[in-house]
Image (cartoon, helix red, strand yellow):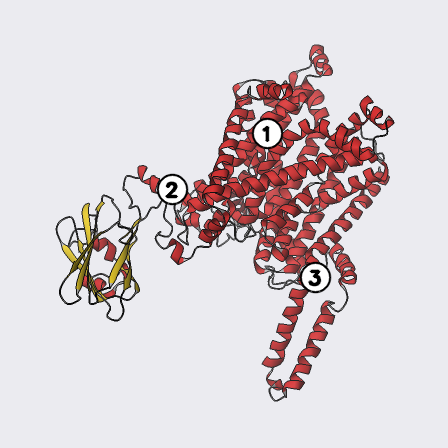
Amino acid sequence: MTKYTALRLVTIFVTVVIGVYLTILIANMGGYVDTIMRNEIKYNAAQAIIANPANRNLTPEVRERLIQEKIRLEEKRLGLDQPFAIRSIRYLRNALTLNLGYAIYMNSDSGSRQVRNILLERLPATLLLTGTSELILFFVSVFIALSLSRKYGSFWDKLTVALSPTSSAPPWFYGIFFILLFAAVWKILPFGGLVDVPPPQNPIDYGLSVLKHLILPASSVIVSSLFLSIYNWRTYFLIYSSEDYVDMARAKGLSSRDVERRYILRPTLPTIVTNFALLVISLWTGFTITETVFLWPGLGRTLYQAIGLYDTPVIVGSTIIYAYLLAITVFLLDFIYALIDPRVKIGGGSPQ
Amino acid sequence: MNRFRNVLGELLRYPSAIIGSLVVFMLISIAIYTLIKIPYREAIRLWRGGEDVWYQNPKYAAPAWLNLFYTKKQPISFAVSSAKGEMEKTVTPLDQDITTIELKYSFDFQYDEFPQDLLLYFKSQFSEKSPFISISWTTPDGRTIRIGDFAVNRSQTFRFSQDKKLQKRLKTEEKVIPALFSVAGGEEYQTLKGKYQLVITATSFESNADIDAEFVLHGKLYGLAGTDQYRRDLTLALLWGTPVALAFGLLASLGTSLLTMIIAAVGTWYSGWVDELIQRITEINLVLPFLAILIMVGTFYSRSIWVILGVTILLSIFSGSIKTYRAIFLQSKEAPYIEAARSYGASNTRIIFAYLIPRMIPLLIPALVSSVPSYVFLEASLAVLGLGDPVLPTWGKVIENAFTDGALYRGLYYWVLEPAVLLMLTGLGFAMLGFALDRVFNPRLRDI
């Protein structure tokens, strides 16, 4: 068991390394970012030397020499004097140890300029939104799908099937409509943000305020994927409940709840979990816009702000953190898959 | 041909297929119509806009047909020009080169709310002596209000609400327009309904001088879809967004599906290290954050829609569906006719492209159609984030403009709802069609 885990861990790690390296390569955009940085250095160096009152009496040639020296030192500090290939290895090592450098413009709430702090501060908000919506989505969908598979062909069944194409719209899309209805027209829920302004001092009130603000974003995520999930799982349940052993179990006289739990739910679980994990992965990437629409102070919104400010280190840092989150999800999926599907041999390959 | 008719027959059993194909058909027709009626260059020129293109429209005007739902009717904008013969023009020559030109326009005002502004755009031709203009305004209850008297340049704009002399004359600074459209006296401004007349009397002092005027009323409503903050008619963006969205969605979906299938076929056929390599690349691709990379490309490199399309396809071809296709290819690899092809010496390429892939195409179709909405929404998502194509008018662009201008806070719901409804329609149409296709082509789901 441990050998399998270790092997899997190494494989995923290698995958992450390659993925992050690719990200760094793309982030450099073939030297374009270097050009931006070099121009900034030239500009800042010139400004610094000219603005310094001690340099006012110097001749232009001496000043020019000072500026060039400053440019050379800055480039050396940022490593621009080395070719990109060597620098990229250093960036890679930094990225893997989460040493993500300093942001150009942005600050974290605690005043730190380090990208790592900026991003890790925002991570809990994203996890809160993601975790809540996905947990609720999972349990609600499975429950409804189970009850629907019992009443195959009924009105509710047909209604769910008819509504499943609504999942083609992403969460932020529903978010706009929800904001329109609940915040702008009916005014019962807030437009966005994490807590009321000013935030309540009492922790219980704070928690309640967060919950109130959580309702709309979580609902958009849930509604966006709800009907398709229900449809998918209901279909799988129907397929599995037409198996012979289910009839046998019913003939044995087991209660229908037992039958459901042991003979229908259990075999479907691997497929459900796979689908669910893929859903989670796709949601990770989509969160940027959902958070922007709801002004939710999470990782996605930070990425959006960084785009607006052209703050490269933060953009690259967020991408790397996303890569890590995805890798963790994939790893957990493998793990859970190995746990619940007895056909998977630990240490062997997963079934094709 | 027979197979095709069978499929069609089965498809028509599902109401979702019928509705879906109708929606798709409607969207494609709108796209073709738009591309013919408003060619690309014209669309870009109009969308780039500027005051001289869109000056006749008010800002932030809702669509005109909303008046059907309002109890208090709101004024609809219009513009009339004497050069086009829409105003009554009488030229009376007097003695000694002096000519009187009279421009008259009357209109019926039956609305319950006041217009945003009234403007007059003058264009006059003369050599040295500028003509003299006198403007008067007649209300339905017979009052005539002097609006202004001045000498006019070759090109001049007169804005009723901003003219200082008119403000003084009506004894109000901000309520010039309500004062012109309501009953005299009293604190409350209520619209006076009836026939209003604008008379411009111009006296020119040269024989060849001429004057033309354009009278513009900026109401609260305009046109079929309303206007945005740059006074642009939103129907342009809504119409032109259709071919853009469809093209992006279809091209991305087609490209991705075809390439994924080819890659899966190649991997399965050659097996060995090629297969392993493709599997590893797929796993790496799973870890790469899709949207974040698109954002990076859009921010640092180029926001052109073709670049975004290319990167999207590149990142999407090594997806999880390779595993599904691989399973099916593994099965069909063992078929006897493949063995026969190998024995007569068919090259690997021929086997892959002529035998393996054509069998898969029916399974490809539902996946293709179902994935179109996600690409359409992807393009809209990028536009909402501010990374849309810089020149093209797309639906996502309209939503982004609306959001940046705080449309929801301001109550300008039409601005957000119109592109959103179109996006939803596109998504639903393709998704429903794809769903029905899935049930027809995927035998496992046929009975369910």
The residue closer to the viewer here, B67 or A31, is A31
- Which class describes the residues within 10 Å of circle 2: few (<14), some (14-19), or many (20+)? some
The CA distance from mark 2 to mark 1 is 31 Å
Q: Which residue is mark 1?
A: B434
User: For numbered disc 3, what is the local secondary structure?
Assistant: helix
Taking depth in this image into account, of B441 and B186 the one nearest to the observer is B441
For the N terminus of chain B, the image quarter is top right
Using the rendered image of the protein, determine whether residue A176 is visible from the camera's viewpoint.
no
Q: Which corner quadrant of the image does residue A94 belong to?
A: bottom right
Q: Residues within 10 Å of mark 1 (few under 14, many from 20)?
A: many
Query: Which mark, residue B224?
Result: 2
Counting residues from the start of the chain, the first of labels 2 and 1 encountered is 2
Quadrant holding the C terminus of chain B: top right
Mark 3 chain: A
Instruction: Give the quadrant of residue A314.
Output: bottom right
Amino acid marked by disc 3: Gly
Q: Residue at x 38, y 50 (%)?
A: B60
Between the C-alphas of marks 3 and 2, the distance is: 47 Å
Q: Which mark is residue A31?
A: 3
Would you place residue A126 above or below residue B28 in this image? below
* Residue A288 at least partly seen: yes
Mark 1, chain letter?
B
Q: Position of residue B204 (x, y in %)?
A: 20, 65
Question: Relative to residue B317, is residue B77 drawn left or right?
Answer: left
Q: Amino acid at mark 2?
A: Leu
Amino acid of disc 1 = Gly
CA–CA distance between discs 3 and 1?
43 Å
